Image (tube, rainbow, N blue to C red):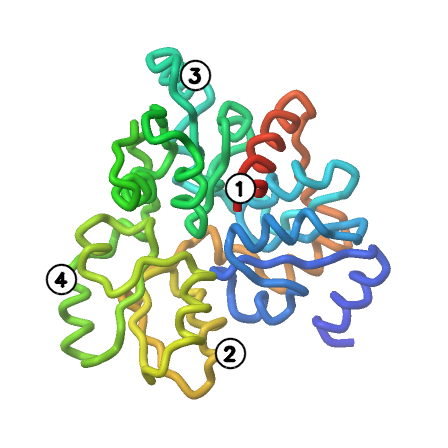
């Protein structure tokens, strides 16, 4: 029996569904029942009939699935797959910030811990941050955590000013406008698509600023034969699968999130075999965190 056959057999036995983020290794994306960006995965997690969810991503993503599915078992095949950005703010730090701005509403990027979601009024993803923030009154003071780059992008799009926490994604922070200039020279005519987690100079130099799901939709609707992609390189696999006649160049070859690459086919197998690692969120945190996620989904 092959490795894939073993996984499928255990998946059937456990009545499990396998979800994967766009940044996962190619073979994990191919294995998954559903692959998407954070918003697509959050929506999918609200409509799962299986008993077990194997989440191929990082810890905060599995937490989100657990929050939205309190009666199901959520497994994270790599227990040490964390997120540096999510770890850049603690519950105490957010509570202190809220105390300094008692009238403010808190928008938290879904790339955050369950505790941060529980302290927030509404979650956002890179795909819907602008739409969600737009739902708040123009004069409403807003705290945006933890990503200063997505926060500044969202505020700019709305012509507003947010109170930004100084967090960031180390992978996207490595990108710069000089790389865009070099890529344009090497691949004339190829549109440059970047993620809103990129610093402002990179966003300003790009042709479009999009979530990974947004990049996939953008490419499908364009006639250009080649694209320069400014985000974690895992998305290139999905883009190539969906657009076999087009060519995709990474803005930065080294834009690889080590945590996203910790999950392997073997770890998915072991996860199903041993029912490990179970990700659970205590109800005192899960209840308010669920409210902030559902508030997001209700808006967009």
SS at mark 3? helix
Q: Is residue 31 above or below residue 232?
A: below
Question: Residues under labels 3 and 4: Cα distance?
Answer: 38 Å
Q: Which mark is residue 299?
A: 1
Measured as percent of width and height from the top left, residue 80 is found at 54, 44
Q: Is residue 265 above or below residue 270?
A: below
Q: Which mark is residue 241?
A: 2
Q: Are marks 1 and 3 in contact (CB under 8 Å)?
A: no
Q: Which mark is residue 258?
A: none
Q: Are marks 3 and 2 in contact (CB under 8 Å)?
A: no
Specify the quadrant of the image occupied by residue 106.
top left
Question: Residues under labels 1 and 3: Cα distance?
Answer: 25 Å
Q: Is residue 87 above or below residue 276?
A: above
For label 3, the residue is 95
How many numbered dots are placed on residues in this image?
4
Q: Earlier in the sequence, mark 4 or mark 1?
A: 4
At 59% from the left and 55% from the top, the residue drawn is 56
Q: Earlier in the sequence, mark 3 or mark 2?
A: 3
Q: Using the image as rendered, state which of residue 276 and residue 243 is in the foreground.
A: 243
Mark 2, residues whose alpha carbon is within 10 Å: few (<14), some, or many (≥20)? few
Question: Residues under labels 3 and 2: Cα distance?
Answer: 44 Å
In the image, is 104 to the left or to the right of 7?
A: left
Measured as percent of width and height from the top left, residue 19 is found at 64, 57
| Placement of the N terminus among the 4 image quadrants | bottom right
In the image, is 170 to the left or to the right of 291?
A: left
Measured as percent of width and height from the top left, residue 31 is found at 64, 69
Q: Is residue 68 above or below residue 288?
A: below
Mark 3, residues whose alpha carbon is within 10 Å: few (<14), some, or many (≥20)? some
For label 4, the residue is 178
């Amino acid at each position: 029996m092959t490795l894939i056959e073993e996984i499928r057999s255990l998946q059937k036995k456990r009545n499990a569904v396998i979800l994967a983020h766009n940044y996962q290794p190619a073979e994990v994306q191919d294995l998954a029942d559903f692959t998407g960006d954070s918003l697509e995965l959050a929506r999918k997690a609200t409509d799962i009939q299986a008993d077990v969810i194997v989440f191929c991503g990082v810890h905060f993503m599995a937490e989100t699935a657990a929050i939205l599915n309190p009666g199901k078992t959520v497994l994270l095949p790599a227990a040490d797959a964390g997120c540096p950005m999510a770890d850049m703010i603690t519950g105490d730090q957010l509570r202190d910030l809220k105390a300094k701005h008692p009238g403010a509403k808190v928008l938290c990027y879904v790339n955050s811990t369950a505790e941060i979601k529980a302290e927030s009024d509404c979650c956002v993803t890179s795909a819907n941050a602008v739409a969600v923030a737009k739902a708040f009154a123009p004069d409403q003071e807003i705290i945006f955590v933890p990503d200063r780059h997505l926060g500044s992008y969202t505020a700019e799009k709305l012509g507003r000013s947010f109170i930004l926490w100084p967090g960031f994604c180390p992978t996207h922070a490595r990108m710069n406008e000089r790389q865009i200039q070099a890529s344009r020279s090497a691949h004339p005519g190829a549109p440059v698509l970047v993620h809103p987690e990129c610093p402002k100079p990179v966003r300003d130099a790009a042709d479009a600023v999009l979530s990974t799901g947004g990049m996939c939709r953008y490419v499908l609707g364009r006639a250009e034969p080649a694209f320069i992609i400014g985000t974690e390189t895992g998305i290139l696999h999905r883009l190539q699968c969906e657009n076999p006649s087009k060519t995709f160049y990474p803005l930065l070859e080294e834009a690889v999130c080590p945590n996203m690459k910790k999950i392997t086919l073997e770890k998915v197998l072991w996860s199903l075999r041993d029912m490990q690692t179970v990700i659970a969120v205590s109800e005192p945190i899960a209840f308010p965190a669920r409210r902030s996620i559902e508030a997001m989904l209700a808006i967009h």
